[in-house]
Amino acid sequence: MKKTALKKFKEIECKACSAPCKSGKAGLCPSCASKKAAEKRAQAKKDKKRRDRTEGNITLDRLIQACHAAIKRIYPLQCHGHQSPIPLERGVKTTQACHFVNSTFYAHKFNPKNILPGCSYCNHTDQSHTWRLGDWIDFYWGEGTAANLRETKQETLKLNQLQRNALFNMFRDETLDRVQTYDFYEKIIKGENTVYHRSTKTPRNPKTDNT
């Protein structure tokens, strides 16, 4: 068996901070090498954001924001995690989008059936809110919907860039109601629609008894 010679490191001074160190990290000490690597990763992230913006590609963060904004629009703006629903205020940090099946399961991360408006306390502190979300999901979408979401949470969902772009435009369309939003969502993730053109129509005001 051939023996591999051990690499010999020289005692040098760091090129950046002049601290004594060993060679092998491009002339840098461990601290400076780690800092340079972090700066390189941060720059790569900035370059990707700039490239995505130039090419019109929607990032995951922007898609999440658009999805959560749509949820607060298509459902009644109340906390669905409290035992007695309380009204929520639009545009504040305490008004959030709560996932029934945890968002770490990518299969339902953007599923309009799986997300309801809720308060920050329920979303981050009170875990008992989850079963209440399930009751509301069955109320909105029919008995057994919540159970189906739990059973299918392990399914694989991979979104390409075209699907991300289409979902973003769909979630930004204020003319869609709850059912229409889910119908388009399902078509996009199944690959039936890979392009969605947001409507330019003015959203209709909700009907009242006087109109």
Image (cartoon, rainbow, N blue to C red):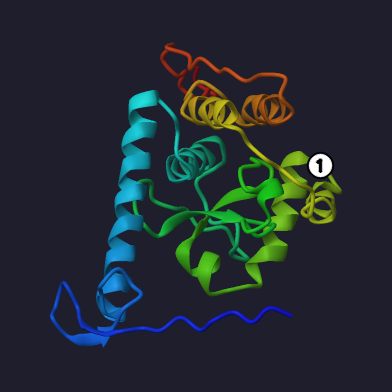
Return the x and y of residue 153 as percentages of the image width and height. Answer: 77, 53
Is 188 or 121 nearer to us in this picture?
Answer: 188
- Going by the picture, which residue comes out furthest to the front? 2
Q: Which quadrant would residue 82 be assigned to in this image? A: bottom right
Give the residue displayed 40% in from the left and 25% down from the top.
56
* Horizontal side, residue 157 vs residue 118: left or right: right
Q: Dot 1: few (<14), some (14–19), or many (≥20) neighbours within 10 Å?
A: few
Label 1 belongs to which residue? Answer: 142
Q: Amino acid at mark 1?
A: Gly
Q: Nearer the viewer, residue 164 or 47?
A: 47
Please state the horizontal and vertical placement of residue 156, each as a whole percent of the image.
76, 46
Identify the residue at horizontal 69%, vertical 43% (top origin): 113
Q: Quadrant of residue 151?
A: bottom right
Figure quadrant of the N terminus: bottom right
Is 146 or 171 nearer to us in this picture? 171
Number of numbered discs overlaid on the protein picture = 1
39 on left or right of 16: right
Residue positioned 40% across, 60% down in the render:
94
Q: Residue 96 vs residue 145: left or right?
A: left
Which structural element holds mark 1?
Answer: loop
Give the left or right position of residue 1, taking residue 122 as reference.
right
* Above or below, 31 relative to 140: below
Residue 38 spot, x, y in % from top left: 32, 64
**Vertical relation: 173 (above or below) 147:** above
- In this view, 77 is above or below 74: below
Instruction: Residue 132 in the image: state x and y as whole percent.
Output: 69, 62
Q: Residue at x 45, y 39 (%)?
A: 59
